Amino acid sequence: MIKAVLFDSDDTLLDFTLAEHIALKKTFEEVGIEPAEDTISLYSEINKRHWEMLERGELTRQQVLIKRFDRFFEAMGIDGDSEATQKLYNHNLGIGHYFVPGAVELLESLYGKYKLYLVTNGNESVQVPRLKSADIGHFFEEIFISQRIGWDKPSIEFFDKCFAAMPPYEKDEMIIIGDSLTSDIKGGINAGIHTCWFNPKGKDGRTDIVPEYVVSALEEIPELLEKIKKA
């Protein structure tokens, strides 16, 4: 039986991809870079690689935030100010929110039936205003932001810190739901809890990180949790 549901935030409940696109476009315009789609895609790919390096423990969070722009400017052949651009982007990214379709309805349907928790690797200065804007904090028993905790998903230390602040659930009473195999699913596997990969775009899986369950739409989650409850 599932008692506690741990949700990732970005691209699981909140549409980070859209928020990133809008924030990047505004930031590039403000620093004098034409915000063409291929330019935004280049940055997004560089950014993704750097966050994966953080997950593997190869970079610190602060290094990710600056080095991603260092590499981007190098690839563009631009002599840019990475620290200033990071601050500007961080500000733009924290403005407003965009929901993944079905997110609010899902939280409303699960609230009161399960204990809900939010677990995110996002920057505190970005996540706090976005979550406040989205007005979903009341659904969660606790909101765990890795920057506050001092460890990032998928490290077991991150989950140990979360578990220490939660009631003493059994491992098989908890499930993590998220869009990232390397962060959410690997983290859940490391922690020994149930895992559900939210994969709306039908991305290819990995043989080394295998989720217990896969859903393509948030609407599938209530039925899945009931199924696990009866297993």
Image (spheres, helix red, strand yellow):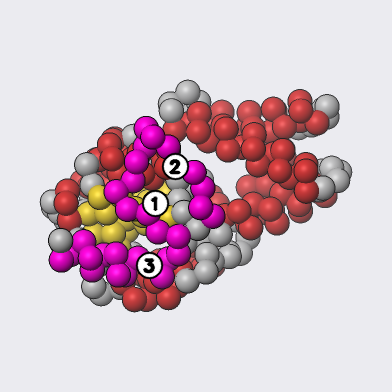
Position of residue 50 relative to residue 33, above or below, is: above
- Residue drawn at 70 percent across, 56 percent down: 22
In the rendered structure, which segment of residues is drawn in magenta? 201-230
Check disc 2 and report the residue beneath it: 205
- Residue drawn at 69 percent across, 39 percent down: 43
- Residue drawn at 23 percent across, 65 percent down: 227
Residue 153 image-quadrant placement: top left
Q: Are marks 2 and 1 in contact (CB under 8 Å)?
A: yes
Q: How many angstroms separate mark 1 from mark 3 (CA)?
A: 12 Å
**Mark 2 or mark 1, earlier in chain:** 1
Kindly identify the amino acid type of the residue bearing the numbered disc 1: Trp
- The answer, for residue 79, to whether it is visible in the render is yes
Check disc 1 and report the residue beneath it: 197
Kindly identify the amino acid type of the residue bearing the numbered disc 3: Glu
Kindly identify the amino acid type of the residue bearing the numbered disc 2: Gly
Which quadrant is the C terminus positioned in?
Answer: bottom left
- Residue drawn at 22 percent across, 42 percent down: 192
Q: Are marks 1 and 3 in contact (CB under 8 Å)?
A: no
Counting from the top left corner in percent of width and height, residue 29 is at 82, 49
Q: Nearer the viewer, mark 2 or mark 1?
A: 2
Query: In screen coordinates, is 75 left or right of 196?
Result: right
Check disc 3 and report the residue beneath it: 220
Q: How many angstroms separate mark 3 from mark 2 (CA)?
A: 19 Å
Mark 2 packing: few (<14 Cα in 10 Å), some, or many (20+)?
A: few
**Mark 3 or mark 2, earlier in chain:** 2
> SS for tag 1?
strand
Q: Which label was assigned to residue 103?
A: none
Which quadrant is the N terminus positioned in?
Answer: bottom left
Query: Magenta segment: does it hold 204?
Result: yes
